[in-house]
């Protein structure tokens, strides 16, 4: 591990980031554009006009987050219920009327491959989303649709490829209105604005992502989403901090956290010093319902009694998609700068590699 950075005002962190995770993060807007182009170029003719009773998205880790985003963001608009499965087992209700999206960046994820085989046995309609591997081979051999995107990225750095094609496929198969495809272009433009403000060239004094990383340093970040899809974004922040910075973090969402976790802030004994150990970030949207905003304000009053540092981060853009992705992108940058501050290479996930190797024995 390299020495921790005392300053984040550097345009190059190559000594800590030799595989250029920063470059992958910077490329997200172009990745979104490319993912839309790729998905629009795939033929969905074999499934066009078919009626589905439900959509099940099978994936793990960074390959599954696109399914979470699709469900959380478009649940009010989707014409069928959506379930995201992070496991070896599909729900018992899947049948010929079920559409299954099998998502694996590598195409080798054993849980997703197991779900693919179950979907095939249940005669589900299948679409694979992958860079290649067994998943692509199986899908093509079985006559199913395979949406193939470029490899070489860590799954968590391939969000554009793991999310945007799901939107396009859902629209082209009649599960979402086609007009929503136009929102992808606006989201790409908003991501470029965030990149201009959070890239490594922008000094910490004017860089929200670097400021957040500084506030997280030496503490456990607690990330709260103010509602719905912002709860999924809070979870994305948590997992990005876990994998990029090799640091522990927690996340939760309003209003659910007001029915359990909020009580944890009222205790006074036995868990050390919250002021020294925790920092809270609220992911907000100025379009959130007034009742949610009130819950956030009241929760802040409860947390303030522990003298814990708190900060709001606000969504940007017009469409729901751009507003969600703007928050995602700030978190991606913040997790990267936290890795740099800790002197941690943000790319490898050696603990996961070790775990997979042990499971394979």
Image: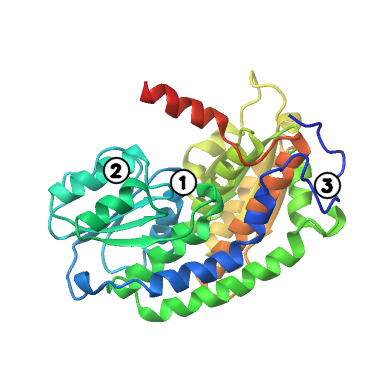
Residue 72 image point, x, y percent: 42, 58
Mark 1, residue position: 256
**Mark 1 neighbour density, 10 Å: few (under 14) some (14–19) many (20 or more):** few
- How many numbered badges does the structure rendering display? 3
Q: Is residue 86 above or below residue 27?
A: above
Which secondary structure lies at badge 3?
Answer: loop
Q: Report if residue 285 is visible in the image.
A: no
Residue bearing the label numbered 2: 113
225 or 207: which is nearer to us?
A: 207
Quarter in which the C terminus is drawn: top left
User: Comparing marks 2 and 1, which lies closer to the viewer?
Assistant: 2
View extreme (top): residue: 270
Residue indicated by mark 3: 8
Q: Are marks 2 and 1 in contact (CB under 8 Å)?
A: no
**From the viewer's perspective, is 263 left or right of 26?**
left
Residue 186 image position (x, y, % from top left): 56, 76
Residue at (53, 71) in percent of width and height? 33
| Residue 329 can be seen in this image | yes
């Amino acid at each position: 591990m390299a020495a921790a950075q005392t300053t984040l005002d550097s345009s190059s962190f190559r000594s800590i980031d030799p595989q250029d995770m920063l470059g992958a993060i910077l490329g997200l807007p172009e990745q979104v554009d490319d993912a839309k182009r790729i998905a629009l170029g795939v033929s969905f003719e074999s499934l066009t006009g078919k009626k589905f009773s439900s959509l099940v998205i099978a994936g793990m880790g960074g390959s599954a987050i696109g399914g979470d985003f699709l469900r959380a963001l478009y649940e009010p608009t989707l014409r069928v219920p959506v379930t995201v499965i992070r496991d070896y087992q599909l729900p018992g209700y899947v049948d010929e009327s079920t559409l299954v999206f099998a998502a694996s960046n590598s195409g080798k994820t054993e849980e997703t491959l197991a779900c693919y085989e179950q979907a095939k046995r249940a005669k589900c309609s299948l679409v694979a989303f992958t860079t290649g591997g067994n998943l692509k081979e199986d899908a093509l051999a079985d006559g199913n649709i395979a949406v193939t995107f470029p490899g070489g990225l860590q799954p968590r750095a391939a969000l554009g490829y793991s999310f945007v094609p799901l939107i396009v496929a859902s629209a082209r198969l009649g599960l979402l209105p086609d007009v929503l495809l136009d929102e992808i272009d606006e989201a790409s433009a908003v991501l470029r604005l965030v990149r201009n403000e959070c890239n490594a060239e922008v000094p910490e004094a004017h860089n929200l992502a670097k400021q957040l990383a500084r506030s997280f340093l030496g503490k456990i970040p607690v990330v709260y989403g103010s509602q719905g899809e912002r709860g999924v974004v809070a979870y994305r922040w948590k997992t990005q901090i876990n994998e990029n910075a090799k640091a522990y973090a927690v996340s939760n969402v309003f209003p659910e956290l007001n029915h359990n976790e909020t009580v944890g802030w009222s205790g006074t004994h036995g868990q050390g010093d919250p002021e020294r150990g925790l920092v809270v970030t609220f992911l907000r949207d100025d379009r959130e319902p007034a009742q949610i905003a009130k819950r956030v304000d009241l929760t802040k009053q409860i947390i303030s009694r522990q003298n814990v540092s708190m900060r709001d981060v606000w969504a940007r853009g017009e469409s729901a998609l751009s507003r969600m992705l703007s928050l995602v992108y700030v978190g991606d940058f913040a997790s990267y700068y936290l890795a740099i501050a800790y002197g941690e290479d943000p790319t490898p996930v050696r603990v996961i590699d070790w775990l997979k190797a042990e499971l394979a024995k």
